[in-house]
Image (cartoon, coloured by chain):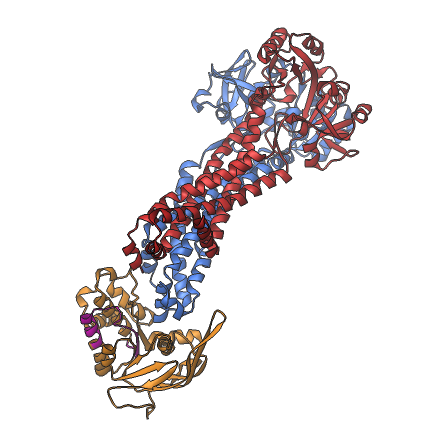
Chain colours: A red, B blue, C orange
Amino acid sequence: MNLLILALKNITRHRLRSFLTMAGVAAGMFLFTSVETMQRSLSEVTSAGAEDTTLVVYRENRFCPATSRLPEYYLSTIMKIEGVRETIPIQIAVNNCGASLDVITFRGVPPGRLEEYNPNLDVLEGSFEAWTKRSDAALIGETFARRRGLETGDQFEAVGIKVHVAGVIASREAQDNNVAYVHLPFLQQASNVGLGTVTQFNVKIKPGAHPDEVAQRIDQTFASDSQPTQTRPEQAFFAETARELIELVGFTRWLGLGAVAAVLGLVANAVLLIVRSRVKETAILQTLGFSKTHIAALVSSEGLLLGLLGGAAGVIAAVSFFHWQSFTLGNEGLTLAITPDLVVLVKGLGVALLLGFLASLYPAWLASRRPVVDSLNAA
Amino acid sequence: MLPLTYAIRNLFRDPGRLLQTVGGSALVVLLVIAAGALTNGMNGVLAASGSERNVILLAAGSEESVERSEVPLEAESAAATAVRGLVKPLGTTAASGEIVYMAPLAVGDGPPVPALLRGVTAKALLVHTKVRVVEGRFPRPGEVIVGRLAHRTLGVAPGRLVPGATIRFESASFRVAGVFEAPATVLESEVWFDRNDLATLTQRDTLSAVYVRLDEAAFDDVHAFTLQRNDLELAAIREDRYYDKVRAFFAPIRVMTWVTAGLVAAGALFGGLNTLYAAFASRIREMATLQSIGFTRRALLESLIQESLLAALTGSLVAFVLAILFLDGRSIPFSLGTFVVELTPAIILTALATGVALGTLGTLPPALRCLQPPLPVALRSS
Amino acid sequence: MSSFIQIRNLTKSYRKGPNLITPLKDLTLDVPRGEFLALMGPSGSGKTTLLNLLAGIDSPTQGELLIDGRDVARLSRSALTKWRSRHVGYIFQLYHLVPILSAWENVELPLLLLPLSRAERGARIDAALELVGLSDRSRHRPTELSGGQEQRVAIARAIVHDPELLVADEPTGDLDSESAASVLTLLGSLARDHGKTIVMVTHDPRAASAADRTLHLEKGQLIESGKLETATAGP
């Protein structure tokens, strides 16, 4: 414990060097944490959870919402299929199909059905009634509202459609928080798709039913129709549709590795410099009775502290940044909210600690093995 | 003035430190080159793709994305006749109605990959003047023509997309009839179908947009047309303005690129500063001795900067070589198309300036600290 | 005839943390041209401070410091640097040679500040190395030389530009008795045969005995004691 205090004193003694090192580590860990946040947000959306699987019925071989056109009358047929509990038709309109940050998504649904289909929707502002009453009303997800600074009663226009905000909602299902729900007929007309056509159907299955079996049944039913379908669990649908997004986030993994390498190099460099500048002092400590293990532990502690303190700064900065500034990546009508959670925070701190330790292994070994006599005579 | 050999030999005093300084500079300069080249490339291809002589007529409300737009077939002939002053080579008005569609295509018996399809008639060549057929010919029904960089989007080797190859869209097969080039534009990564074929395949009876090329006509004339025929529900936007909007859409990604480069560069810079502070600190006595002989602080500062500049410029050279080997000429696909990375003189100059700044400005704080102690004190330091 | 070095009421004080330290107070001293003077005294007595003031490395807080007729105390920093490069040679206890340069190149350093041609420089360096007896080692780097040889290279460097004044801070402090003796002989001959004025700070009484006159510095005050005629103030 005393060694740790000694290490801390050493670090504060050389303020400039410690500051530079920790600033560099903070920068690297900021990058690493940002990447981790994105990776984690993505994996949560694309990995299947055990409960409450939603199936997405889409036009076969289509990806962009503008190109998937399914007849609305499929609805009654789907409802009759074994294993289907609830279905809702959705028309989607987006401002851009490519992967980017400022994607605006409208979901047109039959106004009477939304509450039934998703009872877990929390209305934070406004009300369902207000939404059902006006044909141009929109219920917007809270992340979307925050991003655009919208409140109940505001008007906004996007994708050539003008809507009136009737309420703000929040939901456990990630997609809901980033979209604007509008009336289906309203959207069908406003986006020129025409009444009677929708982009997709979202299907909730009965408890105990097998999602893959139900999906197959649905596809078989429409296989020979003019608009054949392809049905998949929502997560798989995301994984196959938002390919560009996934590639982008996958690419950032390299950035994360680069950040780790940079931090490792930075701390190793700093600790090596520390060791070199204190050769004589280390020897004097040894003559006082500090063993080689003590010396190695002292050096390692300094590396650890540099890594941890700098890393904490970077990790906390990144988590705060993503918490206060909500980023949403969109692709092909699907949205991914980049939100940090406790796991990212803890993982970031752990990685910083580990890097600090690893980086000081070699310098610690170097410091402890130099013969005392040589060190004392060093100029 | 201290001789240059002094500076050079000091560099080799500590090979480990030299490696660090050169490596660190190389990293920072390489990052600047990469970030600059990528954002430049993306910007460039979007800027060059739009001509100010072309106007796009799309569905009102779809000005941000041609893919989403749906325009009645008759808009093509309506525009051709109603707007005077459009380019009219050999009697055919340059008004091209096209279908733009994103769908999975398969090459030969490979897996389907999302690609950008464009259903066109021969009139497309009148409007998209940068397009030139370099191999084969324009497609007839049942055939397609591919852009020179389409192979990148489809993930196959360039040799596989040559006249004679087969492309599949769902269950239908198409023969590649030719290859076109459209240098520095997004069109080069597209696959062009005969418009009727694509309309049948996608079961649509509408166009995505009508592209017209202006001769004596001005944009306002086209705009006036959309107001006169508001039953067609059209909106007019100049092609270059359209791509400007698209470019703005990708701005956050460009910002991300620079922020990342900046963060890693900052880390490298801090490490370099640390190293320099330590290296110079061990030479305080030597600097003081030289001052006692009679060399001015300025002469010593110049020598220290010479050293760092040599190291930083060497690092810059390493970065250039790596960039030329691994970045130059690389084609990078993104959602709208593919751009080719080019190391323009502007980028090289910026990178060079970065190297110079690292060697001079980056050295100043540690060097000044080294020269700052009063002589009697400095002579005693170890 | 006025002395080569004329010091009147010289005071030097500086701050160390919250304290004001005054190693020299109201010092008066005359040193005739060509004299080999030794300064002795306990540590902290201010002898190195006096040496640094003579060499132009430091500036006095108050008083007059005339060297060869020029009031060095009044010179600006850049003028002082220039004066130093032509008129003073400094010999350190730990030699302070540049490790990456050869002996020849180390000796060359002061000449780089003068407007000499390459040939002229070469001639002077060879002469200086010859004088200290190290012509055969001119290409060696400091790490390849013994302590005594390093000090002689340092002396060569100190005289190569033909300064009138040499200051030496414990020049034999780090040497064995044989090397020390040869260095002291060299210094003596520089004063006697070449007319250089030498001021040497030392702890070693044997080193002091090689000098013409020894002065003791205690608490910033000079106390005379020498083996030649005692003289508190020059004519």
**Magenta stretch: includes residue A62:** no
Question: Which residue is nearer to you in this view: A35 or C101?
Answer: A35
Q: Does the image show residue B121?
A: no
Q: Which residue is drawn at 23% across and 72% down?
A: C128
| Image point (39%, 52%), residue name | A273
Residue B277: image x %, image y %?
42, 56
Regarding residue B112, the answer to whether it shows in the image is yes
Q: Give the range drawn in magenta.
A: C162-184
B380, above or below B311, in the image: below
Q: Where is residue B237 in the image (x, y as percent from the top left)?
A: 68, 32
* Vertical position of residue C103 compared to residue A64: above or below: below
Q: Is residue C94 left or right of residue A19?
A: left
Above/below status of A28 relative to B196: below
Q: On screen, A157 above or below A51?
A: below
* Side of C100 where A198 appears, left or right: right
Q: Residue A1 at x, y = what percent? A: 45, 48
